[in-house]
Amino acid sequence: MNKIRVGVSVNNDKIEFLCSPEDTVLDVLRDNLRLTGTKEGCGTGDCGACSIILDDKLVCSCLVLAGEVEGSEISTIEGMAIDGKLHPLQQNFLKHAALQCGICTPGILIAAKALLERNPDPTETEVRYWLAGNLCRCTGYDKIIRAVMDAAAEMRS
Amino acid sequence: MKYSKPRTEKEATDILLAEKGMAKILAGGTDILVQMKAGHIEPDLIVDIKNIPGIKDVISRDGGYEIGAAVSGYDFNINPELKSFAPGIAEAFDLIGSTQIQGRCTMVGNLCNASPAADTVPALLASNCTAKIVGPKGIRECGIEKIPIGPGKTSLDKGEFVKSIFIPSRPDFSSDAYMRLTPRSEMDIAIVSAAAFVTLDSHGVCTNATISLGAVAPTVVRVKEAALLLIGTKLNDSALSRMANECKKACKPINDKRGTIEFRSHVAGVLAKRTALLAYERAGEKIE
């Protein structure tokens, strides 16, 4: 088959992989690179479970073909804790119990991180709109919003 | 399926022309990947146009802006110049999908996906935008309303693709607006949408207007009769009501669980009024 060779940086590691034309970035992350923190939810860009940061933009990795990311920089949930120390967002998710089953959590953490990098002091409304593309069927969202607001406050201080 | 990444416009048209099966253009991919996964389409060839030089650029020219086919909603809306130049187009673009989708979706994709409910299309039409098309015979330009010809269908010939959309210069005291009705405030598709563009004189009297409607017919609708009723007025209640009535008459919507024909037609009039007023207010802020 006509495999495509792609060079990319994932969480600051330079790597190369071979993929089929149909493979998505999500397929490659999970199946080739064994980075299974990024989850597949709907597979059609509605739920945000597969969120990654691709060249500074928040995207659904299920809607990006692996062939498209040649030369790009990708950040996934695996790169969020540094040297074993959890990111303030991760700490606040634990503190507020902002998760139950956990399948949406990596995507929400990545999305929230992308928000705080652009806007360190978001209003609650801004957080809710920013995260509108991340579905959670357990928590009712409130604890997630509080965790993000608290993490933002902590990171500003 | 084959995946190709042409480096020039010529290479892209050549590959498209040579393909015997179904060829699809990929920019943001937020429509075609969904359609592929749903099994609605099975392309033989994907042509990723993002590596063509200039395709991600926003160029300021002739008092307007040329927006490349690979400029995402996120790129557009973090540009304060574009937002203040065309607030109606900016708000329409911003309404597409989630933050994640905004990182990828493009106006050209929205146009060429040819959905009657596409958010940017009524706004682009109200502002008289044009599309630049590259093809085997060279480059041609046409009004954006000539591209979608029915749900999922475009007028593009084999080998052709849209490389940019041009938002033309605006007279003084002009502005635009876009609104849609959706059951939810985020992550939804328009049941009805409307866009307005108005130009005022220095006394706040409307001298030119365009009204367009989305999701009420197989393609976007420009309602000339409605816009004419606003000219010479300050958008008083009676002018707005007559305008809304013309909009209602121009609707040929579908009847489905998301909205009946009567409901959609009525809402089209209401949204046309509101967008016209918002565009009027924005244009008025420039007087003094």
Image (spheres, coloured by chain):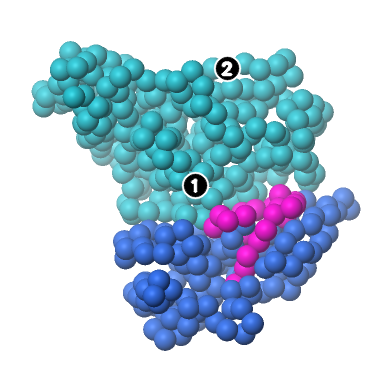
Chain colours: A blue, B cyan
| Residue at the (56%, 63%) spot, across then down | A51
* Front disc: 1 or 2: 1
Find residue A64 and report its horizontal and vertical position in percent: 65, 53
Q: Which residues are magenta?
A: A55-77
Q: Reply yes or no: does residue B252 show up in magenta.
A: no
Q: Secondary structure at mark 1?
A: helix
Q: Give the quadrant of residue A106.
A: bottom right
Q: Report the front residue among B23 and B89.
A: B89
| Residue at the (17%, 20%) spot, across then down | B204
The span from disc 1 to disc 2 (Cα, nearest Å) is 26 Å
The mark total stands at: 2
> Which kind of residue does numbered mark 2 sit on?
Glu
Q: Which residue is mark 1?
A: B74
As drawn, B149 above or below A120: above
User: Within 10 angstroms of label 1, few (less than 14), some, or many (20 or more) residues?
Assistant: many
> To which chain does the residue with label 1 belong?
B
Q: Give the quadrant of residue B248.
A: top left
Which mark, by number, is residue B141? 2
